[in-house]
Image (cartoon, grey):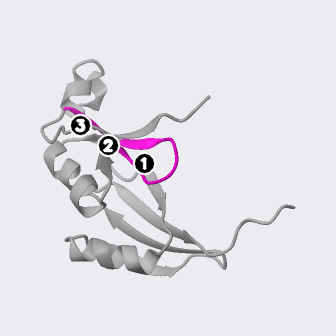
Amino acid sequence: MELAQVRLLVTDFRGCYRFYRDVLGLTPQFEAEDGPYAKFTCDRGSAGIALQDRAQLAEVLADLAAPPAGHRALIALRVDDLDGYCAELTGRGAVLDHGPAPMTDRMRVAHLRDPEGNLLELQQWLAPRTAG
């Protein structure tokens, strides 16, 4: 099995598309600012982040018509320079909810939300996991 993508169901497709492209700096696999679907690739790794217009998918899965209450997922993105990347993001209009700050002795994190309120965690690993 291979993870193909993490897909977010969104109601503000254009706002989310611009956030992932213009604020986070991810590369769209194809231009699709008006939706109903887009996939973004990261610098490293095989899986990507995709956006799906919630209303379109609700046509086949009716219970998706209303967004769920509360957070149901967190997208974690690893970066090499957390402070530098956060400075870039805030310069492009992002608002950090938390951090950059230590999470553990091996990792620093920052948290922010996309226009739909989906939670993102930016991670900078300071030390690799040890076997044992």
Mark 2 crowd level (few <14, some 14–19, many ≥20, 10 Å Cα): few
Image x and y of residue 26, in percent: 32, 54
Do the numbered discs 2 and 3 sit on residues whose CB atoms are within 8 Å?
yes
Q: Which residue is mark 1?
A: 72
Q: Amino acid at mark 3?
A: Ala
Q: Is residue 116 visible to the viewer in this orientation of the structure?
A: no
Q: Quadrant of the N terminus?
A: top right
Tell me: residue 27, above or below residue 38: below
**Label 3 secondary element:** loop
Tell me: residue 105, above or below residue 33: below
Residue 40 is one of the magenta-drawn residues: yes
Do the numbered discs 2 and 1 sit on residues whose CB atoms are within 8 Å?
yes
Image x and y of residue 52, in percent: 27, 35
Do the numbered discs 1 and 3 sit on residues whose CB atoms are within 8 Å?
no
The residue nearer to you, when weighing 124 against 57, is: 124
Which label's residue is closer to the chain start, 1 or 3? 3
Q: Which residue is mark 2?
A: 68
Q: Which residue is mark 3?
A: 66
